[in-house]
Amino acid sequence: MSNFFHTKIEFLKGIGPMRAELLQKELNMYTYGDLIQHYPFRYLDRTQFYKIAELDETMPYVQVRGRVRGKQLLGEGRKQRLAATLVDEAGDEMELVWFKGVKWMEKSLKNHTDYIVFGKPTEFNGKFNMAHPELEELAEEKQTTSFLQPVYNTTEKLKNHRIDSKVISKYIESLLKIAALHIQETLSLDLIDHYRLTDKRSALQNIHFPESVEKYNAAKFRLKFEELFYIQLRLLRQKVVRRADLAGQIFKQVPTVTEFYKNHLTFDLTGAQKRVIKEIHKDLTSGKQMNRLLQGDVGSGKTIVAFITMLIAADNGAQSVLMAPTEILADQHYTGLKEFADRLGIKIGKLTGSSKTKERRELHEQLRSGEMKMIVGTHALLEDVVQFHNLGLCIVDEQHRFGVEQRSKLWRKNPRIIPHVLVMTATPIPRTLAMTLYGDLDVSVIDEMPAGRKEIVTVHRFDSHRLRVFQFVRDQIKLGRQIYIVYPLIEESEQMENYKDLMDGYESVRRAFPEYQVSMVHGKLKAQDKDYEMQRFVRHETQIMVATTVIEVGVNVPNASVMIIESAERFGLSQLHQLRGRVGRGAEQSYCILMTGYKLSKDSKTRLETMVRTNNGFEIADIDLKLRGPGDLMGTQQSGVLDLLISDLAKDAPILQEARAAAQNILQEDPQLEHAEHQNIRRHIQSLSANTVNWSRIS
Ligand code: ADP
Ligand code: MG
């Protein structure tokens, strides 16, 4: 946007320095550009009203028309609240309540006046009420020409200073009047043509004050497309730049890989595994450093892909590291890979926090000399004393537990040429998110399960049915199977008292199954003890494993066929799916039983229903994203990318795909954006980056 949009908002008629300062503080709104991009978060639809008699607690938000009859202040001091009665045309009543800004509401709410109220209905003692509803006097209705009236985000503080949604709407209305001539097109005419987009000016006008449903939809689509297009363009350009910069070792030789395929691999790789290995192999022979994310649902067979990749490195005289987030998992990887490596005559080692000093010294030596080709371990691998002869490949399993910083420590272990990187995750990041967050990583997906797996049967049972569930457990154990019982524990670092559920559970399981052996594993155990308990279960010395989520990641006990999750409503959807993935790894039919009490929130119900309905990790990740929102899913690290003004990654996947394709085409054709038809885009990128050093913000 041109300089006009860098004008400070205090210069807009009606704002002034004082309000400008408030808007800055509360909404981060500095310039005309910020104001015009303060899009409504929803609209009041004049055509949709509910009668109080029709209300129902499951409704998220409703609009009700009625008259305020009586209002009163209740309680004292900080507990003070304002209650008012709203009566609709049919004569039904509901209560409106305020806990904050009580004094001001008390003054401004007019008795015996018709209002439109908007909020979430809640039922209490058989009567509906609405806390902090938005209010609008019915008489004002006629002022607006727009069929959908915008509703803007504000804060309590702004409202206390009379800057409510209405007032913001007035600011934007007057800004749009003077801005018209300054609004420049930010997309190329080609794009506008090809995707039949509405122009920028009309989009801004109609996103705030829709003239019709069609124009509103067109505006929304155009602005979402634009937003996602520029994010993708930025990510893709970064990728091009990074690619050009980093060279990688070339791994052309594959004699041992061939031998392994021929003589040692006991099963056929799935089509997806083969495809992914091809993708990786292509990277490793390209002369550029590989930076690849490997996604595959639990049990899809990522480990073997990792091993083959490590073999390729070994075949070319390079060493490789496989780093796991927990000791248990490192052990398991080590045990699994060592079996193959031994047969192939390749030296493999393990380094974890509990490796003995003498062992360590030996390992360090063998890594420095290059004698040891593969090393599996935990964070212990990151220590500076761990040096390599020629580290050529770093594989990180379950990447969400590693920080970027820790990873970069690994990369630096080869001072001559940066190692290839493969990040493996079983958290199926929805494609939309992966594309947005990892635009700079290449993504491979194993989207096919090894043949012969039986779908895990998942059921939801209430606590009151525990006896029957335990009988089922007994039957399964009699068939020779093993059982997991998992208890929720939010933070592994927390106090012992939080283990009460687990301990109580353990006791009751022991009492219920005196004839069987029970293991217990949790985060407070010393690594050795954890390992001991885990190994007892792996060796089938115990039939039941009582655990917290420490078993969530990667552990492989093919004979375990039942996963019972206690207080399942307290787990997130992705976590439930991860836990379920601990069973169903053998040939037997497996079961996942979700135990809960009767009292369940709506989201909990959705999570449980989803688990019962599907085993598809990607579908589950999508629903998880919808329930939790993207910020929550990925932590704060990438939140900058996700500061979206109008798009919703959970819903706008199709637009994102189009926008990404468009960005790819343009960069392919014109990487430097030099063509005449791309000048709009070039100018907009410049203005976007100028905005990050926004002079009006500094002064
Ligand atoms: P994850 O992707 O969860 O890490 P694993 O690599 O642990 O999965 O694989 C799960 C199990 O499936 C292992 O026992 C592994 O040996 C087996 N497996 C992997 N690939 C295949 C295949 N193509 N056919 C049959 N079994 C396979
Ligand atoms: Mg794994």
Image (spheres, helix red, strand yellow):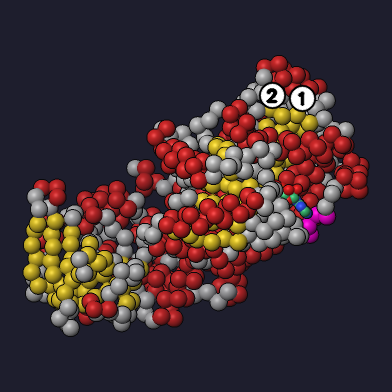
Residue 87 visible to the viewer: yes
- Which of the numbered marks, if any, corresponds to residue 386? 2
Q: Identify the residue at horizontal 8%, vertical 69% (top origin).
A: 70
Residue 424 percent across, percent down from the top left: 66, 46
**Residue 271 in magenta stretch:** yes
Q: Is residue 638 left or right of residue 159?
A: right
Q: Secondary structure at mark 2?
A: loop
Q: Is residue 413 left or right of residue 177?
A: right
Quadrant for the N terminus, please. Answer: bottom left
**Residue 626 in magenta stretch:** no
Q: Is residue 635 left or right of residue 671?
A: left
The amino acid on which the numbered mark 2 sits, given as a three-letter code, is Val
Q: Residues within 10 Å of mark 2 (few under 14, many from 20)?
A: some
Residue 555 percent across, percent down from the top left: 64, 43
N-terminal-most mark, 2 or 1: 1
Mark 2 and 1 residues: CB-CB less than 8 Å, in contact?
yes
Residue segment shown in magenta? 268-272
Q: Residues within 10 Å of mark 1 (few under 14, many from 20)?
A: many
- Which of the numbered marks, if any, corresponds to residue 437? none
Q: Identify the residue at horizontal 80%, vertical 54% (top origin).
A: 269
- Which of the numbered marks, if any, corresponds to residue 367? 1
Q: Is residue 97 left or right of residue 184?
A: left
